[in-house]
């Protein structure tokens, strides 16, 4: 058993270490003891509350994602062809590429006499054609929308700092915005003027545009409205993040420009050397068409060309981050 004198000495040491007044030290220690006892007896209740809070936050996040998915259109190859303004639909595109794939397979079998290339060339062409549409969509449509979205959100931050009305701020930004973003903003304002819910209109607006910046902006506005935060601060912070990311993206493009040139030169030299040997040397042509090693070499060359093109085209995705 610890004696009363030992407790007094321990208490005096604690008081001297903490340098507390004689009246404050007992109050603090008593309060800490009561709080510790309360937490210990109600630990299960606190755990259930934290679990419920986590479930609520996850549910809210799921509801927001599903809200976007409800209005978001499918951005498949047919959608991308339409946005690119091509005069053909996806069925015609698919039929044309099937004919080209069969022609490549026939040429590989009759001209190169290569069964391996005959087997892989149709699949490579079908994958290549669809990914080419994706690349054109990213460079000609999505990149334009992203650039306009970044400009619009920065202008919106400046205008909204003067007028605290989001609808009026969007209306003032429209005249200085180019198509296709201008058309989407005009649709947004038209829907809000028909007494539709602003948050719902914003969700539809973000779902129609393939822009991460717009979706982030809309998420911020909705969260600010739900939790009573300052929407102005959300818009300003979003604009600052966009400016920082644009600077980092420019640096990334400058750093990868040399590597991209090297890959492009490699992609050109390989088929040029192959054609030069195939046309100018009968011995090389016989190796490429009449031996197993030569046939495998040609098939590997086609795969290497596709892999180089694929990773070179994906650099645009990295530059969008």
Image (spheres, rainbow, N blue to C red):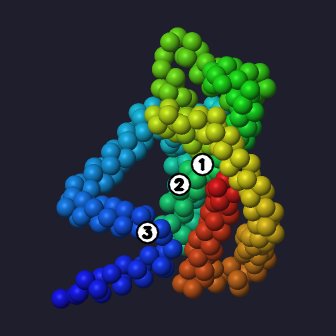
Foreground mark, 2 or 1?
A: 1
User: What residue is shown at x 75% (from left), y 62% (from top)?
Assistant: 252
Q: Position of residue 302 (x, y in %)?
A: 61, 70
Residue pictured at 18% horizontal, 88% vertical: 1
- Give the Cα separation between the discs numbered 3 and 2: 84 Å
In this figure, which residue is indicated by the disc labeled 3?
Answer: 22
Tell me the quadrant of the picture where the C terminus can be found. Answer: bottom right
Instruction: Give the residue at x 73% y 53%.
Output: 244
In the shown orientation, is residue 90 left or right of residue 85? left
Dot 2: what SS? helix
Residue at label 1? 134
| Measured Cα–Cα span from mark 3 to mark 1 | 75 Å
Residues 159 and 189: in front is: 159
315 relative to 177, above or below: below
Q: Residues within 10 Å of mark 3 (few under 14, many from 20)?
A: few
Q: Nearer the viewer, residue 65 or 181?
A: 65
Secondary structure, mark 1, is helix
* Image label count: 3
- Describe residue 3's horizontal placement relative to residue 112 as left or right: left
Q: What is the x, y in percent for residue 295?
A: 57, 79
Check the image and report above or below for 37 versus 245: below
Pick whichever, 228 or 123, lies toward us.
228
Question: Would you say residue 185 is visible in this rendering?
Answer: no
Q: Which residue is mark 2?
A: 126
Label 3 or label 1, whichever comes before in sequence order = 3
| Pointer 2 local density, CA inside 10 Å: few below 14, some 14–19, many at least 20 | some
């Amino acid at each position: 058993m610890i004696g009363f004198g030992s407790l007094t000495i321990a208490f005096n040491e604690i008081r001297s270490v903490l340098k507390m007044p004689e009246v404050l030290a007992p109050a603090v220690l008593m309060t800490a003891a009561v709080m510790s006892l309360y937490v210990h007896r109600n630990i299960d209740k606190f755990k259930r509350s934290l679990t419920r809070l986590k479930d609520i936050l996850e549910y809210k996040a799921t509801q927001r994602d599903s809200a976007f998915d409800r209005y978001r259109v499918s951005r498949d190859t047919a959608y991308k062809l339409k946005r690119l303004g091509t005069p053909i639909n996806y069925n015609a595109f698919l039929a044309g590429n099937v004919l080209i794939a069969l022609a490549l397979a026939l040429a590989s079998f009759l001209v190169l006499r290569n069964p391996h290339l005959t087997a892989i060339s149709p699949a490579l062409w079908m994958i290549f054609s669809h990914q080419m549409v994706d690349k054109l969509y990213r460079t000609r449509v999505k990149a334009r929308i992203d650039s306009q979205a970044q400009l619009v959100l920065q202008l919106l931050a400046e205008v909204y700092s003067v007028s605290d009305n989001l609808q009026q701020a969007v209306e003032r930004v429209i005249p200085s915005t180019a198509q296709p973003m201008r058309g989407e903003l005009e649709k947004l304002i038209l829907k809000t003027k028909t007494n539709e819910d602003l948050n719902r209109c914003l969700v539809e607006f973000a779902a129609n545009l393939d822009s991460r910046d717009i979706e982030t902006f809309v998420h911020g506005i909705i969260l600010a409205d739900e939790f009573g935060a300052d929407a102005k601060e959300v818009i300003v912070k979003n604009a600052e993040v966009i400016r920082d990311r644009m600077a980092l993206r420019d640096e990334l493009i400058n750093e990868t420009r040399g590597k991209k040139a090297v890959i492009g030169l490699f992609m050109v030299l390989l088929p040029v050397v192959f054609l030069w040997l195939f046309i100018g040397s009968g011995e090389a042509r016989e190796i490429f068409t009449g031996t197993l090693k030569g046939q495998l070499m040609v098939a590997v060359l086609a795969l290497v060309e596709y892999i180089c093109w694929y990773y070179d085209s994906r650099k645009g995705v990295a530059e969008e981050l």
